[in-house]
Structure formats: C-alpha cells, structure tokens
Image (cartoon, rainbow, N blue to C red):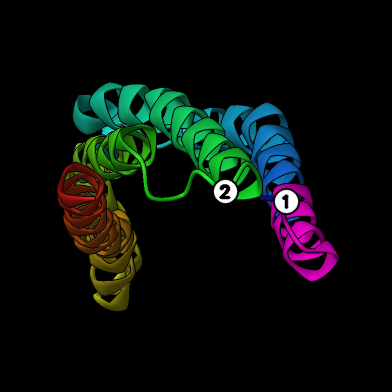
Amino acid sequence: MHTTPVKRASTLFLKAVIILIGGVVLVLCAVVFPQIYTALRNVPEAAAVMYPALIGLYATPLPFFFALYQAFRLLQYIDANNAFSVSSVQALMLIKYCAIAMSLLYAAGMPLVAVLAELDDAPGAILIGAAIVAAPLVVATFAAVLQKLVRNAVDMKLEHDLTV
C-alpha cells in the first residue's frame, strides 16, 4: 500500500517545518545565548543564580533537537504507512520525556527570572517565565495523549491480526 501524493506532500511540508524550526533554534543558540551571558555577567545581583540558569538554558537544545529528530522519524513512519506501530509509540514516548526535560531545565532558570523581575520591578516577567516553563509540559501532555491513542490502536491491530 502506497501513500497518496497529498499525504506525502503534507508530511514533506511538516518535515520542512521541522528542519526550519531546528535551523532557527540553532541560530538562536549560536547568537542569542552568548549575548544573554554577556548581559548577565554585568548584573552583580544575578551572580548567585546566573550559572544554574545558564546551564539549564545551554542544556535545553539537547532534548529539543532529540525531540525534533523523533518527530521527523514519526513522519517517516507515517510516510511508510507504519503510523500505528510500536516504533511510533516509542517516538511519542521519547518526545514526551524530552518535553518534560526541557521544562525542568527551564525551571532551573526561574530564580534568575525572579531576580531580574525584582530588579526591573516587572512582576509580569515571572508570569512569562512560568509560561515558558509550562509550554513544554503542554507538548508533553499532548504527546502522552497521542502515545496512549497510538498504543491502543496498535493493541487493537494486534488483536485483529490474531483473530483473523
């Protein structure tokens, strides 16, 4: 059974989006992260919490790019008409874990956000920081729901194959 051209085009578009997102994040890591370090180096009040936050910030791309790779693999499974497989369930599980790891790494930076919000008298910055910590949790929840649905589909498919 072959994939239709429309299905192939939509997964091709999604693969291109994944590559584009990866490129943008890579540029941000190369350009913005060093600027953040340079700016924070000159804030003595942030010295105590700066390095855990920067470690979390610099470590975040690892699970992010691994999750993008898993999403790319998931699209390849869809192209191969293998969307409802154990491999897809595993890819969704890994995406979920990567999102949780990203959230934890971002949470390591919350003390720095609190210090900077206090210095600038900007309590809204804490809400923005909390939203950044929560965003990967939304992705993790979505991946967990999809993982459960795909696992149920795989189980039903196996039951059907055994009955026939």
The kind of secondary structure element at disc 2 is loop
Write down the residue under mark 2: 81
Decide which of 101, 69 is in the foreground and name it.
Answer: 69
Indicate yes or no whether the magenta region holds residue 8.
yes
User: Residue at left 25%, top 39%?
Assistant: 93
| 86 relative to 9, above or below | above
Residue type, label 1: His
Q: Main secondary structure of the magenta part?
A: helix
Q: Position of residue 151 (x, y in %)?
A: 20, 50
Quarter of image, res 119: bottom left
User: Residue at left 61%, top 27%?
Assistant: 34
Residues in magenta, as a range: 2-16
Q: Residue at the far front: name it.
A: 164
Left or right, residue 72 beside residue 128: right
- Count residues near mark 2 (Cα–Cα under 10 Å), then give few for <14, some for 14-19, many for 20+: few
- Count residues near mark 1 (Cα–Cα under 10 Å), then give few for <14, some for 14-19, many for 20+: few
Decide which of 29, 91 is in the foreground and name it.
Answer: 91
| 58 relative to 11, above or below | above
Residue type, label 2: Asn
Q: Position of residue 46 (x, y in %)?
A: 28, 36
| 136 relative to 130, above or below | above
Q: Are marks 1 and 2 in contact (CB under 8 Å)?
A: yes
Write down the residue under mark 1: 2
The kind of secondary structure element at disc 1 is loop
Indicate yes or no whether the magenta region holds residue 24.
no
Q: Position of residue 121 (x, y in %)?
A: 28, 72
Q: Position of residue 75 (x, y in %)?
A: 59, 46
Q: What whole-number distance in Å separates the C-alpha atoms at marks 1 and 2?
A: 7 Å
Q: Residue at the far bottom: name it.
A: 124
- In the rendered structure, find residue 132 and report the number of the disc placed on it: none
First-in-chain label (1 vs 2): 1
Decide which of 58, 11 is in the foreground and name it.
Answer: 11
